[in-house]
Image (cartoon, rainbow, N blue to C red):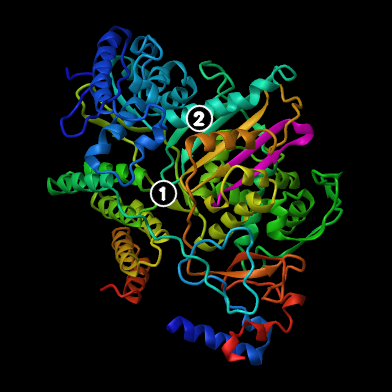
Amino acid sequence: MKRLVAVLFVLLGACTTGPQRSLPPVVEGSASRPPIGGATLPGDTAPQPVEVPPSAPATGGAVIALLDRADSYRASGDSANEAAAIERALRIEPNNARLWSRLAATRLEQGQPRQAEQLALKSNALSRGDRRLQAQNWQLVARARWALDDGAGARAAEKKARDLGGS
Amino acid sequence: MADLLRQTEDSPQLELVLVGQSDSDRVAKQLQAFVDKYAERFAGRDPEASPLALAEPVERPAADLEPHVALREALAQVIDLDLGDQLFPAPGGGRFRQGLGLVQAAAGTSKSFPAFLDLVRRQLRRDYNESDLVSEGLRIFTTLDPQVQWALQKSLDARIRPLLDKQPELEGAGLVTHSANGEVLALAGGRQAGFAGFNRALDAQRHVGSLIKPAVYLTALEQPGRYNLASRIDDGPLEFEQSGQLWKPENYDREFHGEVMLYQALASSYNVATARLGLELGVNAVIKTLRRLSVEEPLNPYPSLFLGATDLSPLTVTELYLNFASGGFRVPLRSIREVLDANGEPLQRYELSVERVIDPGPAYLVHRALQMVIEEGTGRALNGRFSAQLGLAGKTGTTNDLRDSWFAGYDGEKLGVIWMGRDDNKPMGLSGGSGAMQVWAGLYAAAGAVAAQPMKPDTVEWYQVDKLSGGLADSGCDNTVQLPFVEAGSKPPNAPCARGGALRWLPEWLR
């Protein structure tokens, strides 16, 4: 409903402000690609959001098994092997934002804040509108930046986490 | 001393060994036993089925699938200098082996893939003493994917062999890497797979031609206030004085195309428009971009750099394109995952690391431009072979007088860089599209292509653009293209066909 209102607003605005304002983005939400083949919009209709590709595929059995293994390494305090298990999972599902986030958290525990920060950013780049995960990643970034004595950067990251609804 | 090949109960996993000759028999025996044991478990499967399909870890219960994955990984890791021939002396022995195509891979790892091994050795030598490598019996886990390696080698051979009558000196090389983690899945150092000679993938320094252009366009798109994918660039005649000499770039088709959109200039690889854009940006700005994208080789400091008149190796081109394929993250290349000592203790891990080097907005725009290369540009021949839904992206490269044929392309999972040419740098008659791109197509057809689904950053929105005028379009325009724009950046004016089209956006019931 919200989107319909927004579209209407833009459309009505078009009546008074000319064509430029009447050109809302063709794609909304987290869609990643336009229709194939330079498709044109159907005539005389409001712009259609382009088909949204499926979000991250459901996690498969092999990945779940590897995460179980990572958990048991974690329980025994073996963060090096924990990270290795997550890396293996990432080989199977390289676009799984949660795996990247988990690896970021592990790197932080391994005492590698710089990598933790970058891995959390990578996770966000794949997060497909998952605000909770994004907030969690910004919190990781904040912790990493504190560890790097980057107070200003850390506070900026904390603010982003808060704005996304994280604590 | 621990077993050279080790299995654990819950996950059958072989570990690779870099053994001396004396150990080969024992290793061969153990590996044979391992394969036999698992051959039974797969006996019911279709022997013709693609090995990749069998090993695909999707939607199968873990228990069912783990041996495939483990075996595939394990065999990929068998690296031994003299092991190959002894492992599976009778070709076509078992049904399982034929079906999986793994035997060849295992047996060939040392004999047939010396080029890949070369990369592994270099990485090891960088980190270890030569004496440690010989005496300590290190276990080395590599990143090689035998299926991809064979697909690469076969495709290279299929393109080159028919041409050898006329071009006996024709050579080729290629690298395939995992875009997300930088692992090298396959490497071909030359046309002959088992020939351990000059490793062109690592050591050939060749003009890269148009393969360099995305760096020019990225430099522009990183100034979103000034440039966008629809920016007009002039592809009319250009003369430029460069250190006392007159530089007059020409297009591949020897024609000029007038005003074109920025994305079109890249997709169709127009030299003159690219040179003009480069001159606006400056050579130093483009060099700075290339340095940031991990190109360390000396670069030609003159404007001809914009058209790729500078030497790079396929390895460096791979590093450069990984930045695009991974959505703007630098990913160091790795051929080794882990090194264990003879007791199975990890000596060294080669950890996955990433670093954002291109902002999300420009990274997304460059990716779209590289997709347009396939959709409507110099790579459009690929559309006959691959579904448009895959969203493949890439760039062709051709150098003067057809001396080098390049293609760098990626799907949602891996990046493939192919080079073809002659070692003596003489013309060999192939363009990027007619040579390297076809090798790439054969490779991806065999290895399987995965749809690319990059996530649109919040700072970017899609608009329709009129192809004729380059202006923003609406339903009044017939011939349009969808392009992403950095929302805070510049946008083209409205297209003439969009005038008065506003009301037509209204749904029927509102009019």
Q: Residue at x 29, y 7 (%)?
A: B22
Estimate the x, y position of residue B355 in percent, counting from the top left. Answer: 43, 51
Chain assignment, label 1: B
Of label 2 and label 1, which has the lower sequence position? Answer: 2
* Residue closer to the observer: A43 or B416: A43
Q: Residue at x 77, y 76 (%)?
A: B496
Point out the residue furthest to the left here: A76
Q: Which residues are magenta?
A: B391-408
B380 w.r.t. B140: above or below: below
Chain assignment, label 2: B
Kind of residue sitting beneath label 1: Val
Query: Based on the displayed image, in which of its 4 quarters is residue B48 positioned?
Result: top left
Q: Residue at x 28, y 23 (%)?
A: B39
Estimate the x, y position of residue A76 in percent, counting from the top left. Answer: 12, 45
Residue at disc 1, secondary structure: loop
* Residue B354 - label: 1
Q: Which residue is mark 2?
A: B151
Kind of residue sitting beneath label 2: Ala
